[in-house]
Image: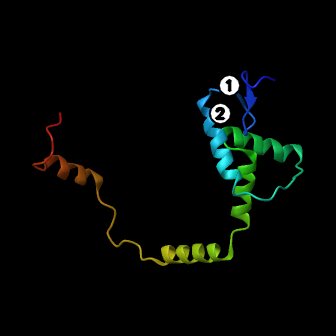
Amino acid sequence: MSEKLSKATPGGSFAGPRSKRSRLSYACYCMCMSTLSHRTQLLLDDERHRRLEEEARRTGRSIASLVREAIDVRYEREGQSAGRRQAATVLLDAPRPSDPEPDWAEVERELLDSPAAPDLP
């Protein structure tokens, strides 16, 4: 295939040589790939592959980035999970606000009756 006509972008789609999306996608691909140093081949059944393809299409991401994210979520680093547990404990142990839920009709009247309120019909 002639380079002038069209070539595949790293995401697998075809775009012309002057396509802005093609150039941006390629630049992002090159920058990200420079930090990745291990290649892994993964065999999936049809159902898992279909789910990944659908999510990739829906989010505009690559299947590889979805797999990397799933690995990060499932196998997070030890310090990260301890920090998250601590943050959850702080939030769950925090006292609830003692103020009761305001009467929203009264709040609306107060706002509309205030001197700063605009003239509304």
Instruction: Examine the rendering and report whether any part of residue 116 can be seen.
Output: yes
Q: Pointer 1: residues within 10 angstroms few (<14), some, or many (20+)?
A: some
Q: If the image is split into quadrants, where does the N terminus sit?
A: top right
Q: Are marks 2 and 1 in contact (CB under 8 Å)?
A: yes
The colour scheme used here is rainbow
- The label on residue 16 is 1
Q: Would you say 54 lies left or right of 101 here?
A: right
Residue 29, percent across and down? 68, 45
47 left or right of 33 in image: right
**Mark 1 residue type:** Gly
Is residue 60 among what the camera can see?
no
Q: Earlier in the sequence, mark 2 or mark 1?
A: 1
Q: Position of residue 82 (x, y in %)?
A: 62, 77
Which mark identifies residue 22?
2
Specify whether 86 is left or right of 48. Answer: left
Query: How many angstroms separate mark 2 from mark 1 (CA)?
Result: 7 Å
Residue 83 position, x and y percent, is 58, 76
